[in-house]
Amino acid sequence: MLGLPRITEWADTARREAVMFSAGYLAGGAEAEPTRADQSDYFATEYQDNYRDSFYYASDAAEFEEIVAAIAAGTSTLKPIKMAPGTFQLTQCWSVAKEELSGLWVIGSPEGGTILRGPSDDEAVEIVFAASELNSTFEIGFKDLRIHSQTDENAMHINNTNAGKKINVYFDGSCCDSSGTGKALLTTHGDTSNAIRMYCNPGFNTDWDKSIYLAGGNNGDRFRATGHNFEEDGIETSNTATLMEITLAACLLKHEGITGGNAAQKVNLVGCWTESGGAAAAADASDVGGDQTTVVSP
């Protein structure tokens, strides 16, 4: 969708030398060996086919972090990372901070059950860049995956303060959740010259169990979702007089759950509904409790 190649378009049959990386994310600074295509271990000096011909494979958090570090360091070709079912426990926030990661897809099991869990005292994933890091639009995608933070921490934070370029994030059958005071998704919009855009497509993981906070700042800002569930805690936007487009299609909403906002922001509800006591009701303008301008379509 919208500029990101699918996994079938990434094909790299070249064999590469496996390289060991210091696992800075790991407790105690231990090092972990990568995995062969058959999921057995090999040593750093072995010559292998780089996990798979068309993607990398991670069976635990150590391998996932190792692959990410390799790509960010520019020592490994950009390819999707496929994660096995299970919980991948990070020991520190995954800071997506390198241009080399643009175009990356992180893919869980299509049957569900793949969770990327944040550390106990920090956000799970932060997308943030130093000044002059980006030379073009940054894009990253998550597929068949749930990103979960610990109590009172944010699951995903997109901060464009020094980005200098547009940021696009894709959730294909993926979502975020938290607990306590943490947000499922939070944006910080320090760079008002460039947009933050998020696209949520249907799939296995579509239940956003905590609130979403979207900071406006650019007329190109977008949040689009099809077939996702925002019933639990709703969506809040900042009181910013710029055009932020929020389009929700075939989504389950919290009644009056879209809050905050400004009249310059547009909320489009297309075939959405709310639910109470087991009874569904078509979404209408009353389900937007904030100051955004609302358009409701059947």
Image: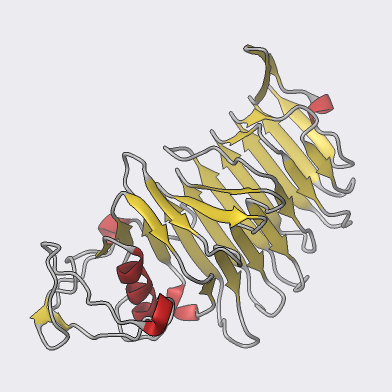
Q: Residue visible at 72% across and 75% down?
A: 161
Q: Position of residue 270 (x, y in %)?
A: 66, 29
The answer to whether 246 appears left or right of 27 in the picture is right
| Location of residue 178 with respect to 92 vertically, above or below | above
| 298, 217: nearer the viewer | 217
- Colour mode? secondary structure
Q: Nearer the viewer, residue 241 or 188?
A: 188
Residue located 57% across and 56% down the image: 150
Residue shown at 47%/38% (left/top)? 202
Quick check: 49 left or right of 253?
left
Where does the image place residue 215, in percent across and percent down from the top left? 77, 58
Q: Nearer the viewer, residue 71 or 179?
A: 179
From the top left corner, tell me how far across and down residue 282 is, in percent: 69, 18
- Residue drawn at (55%, 59%) of the image: 169
The correct choice, above or below, for 254 with respect to 3 in the image is: above
Please identify the quarter of the rendering in which residue 105 is found: bottom left
Quarter placement of the C terminus? top right
Using the image, determine if residue 203 lies above or below residue 242.
above
Residue closest to the eye, 192 or 182:
182
Q: Quadrant of residue 277?
A: top right
Left or right side of 99 for 295:
right
**Residue 127 pos. (x, y %):** 58, 69
* Badge count: 0
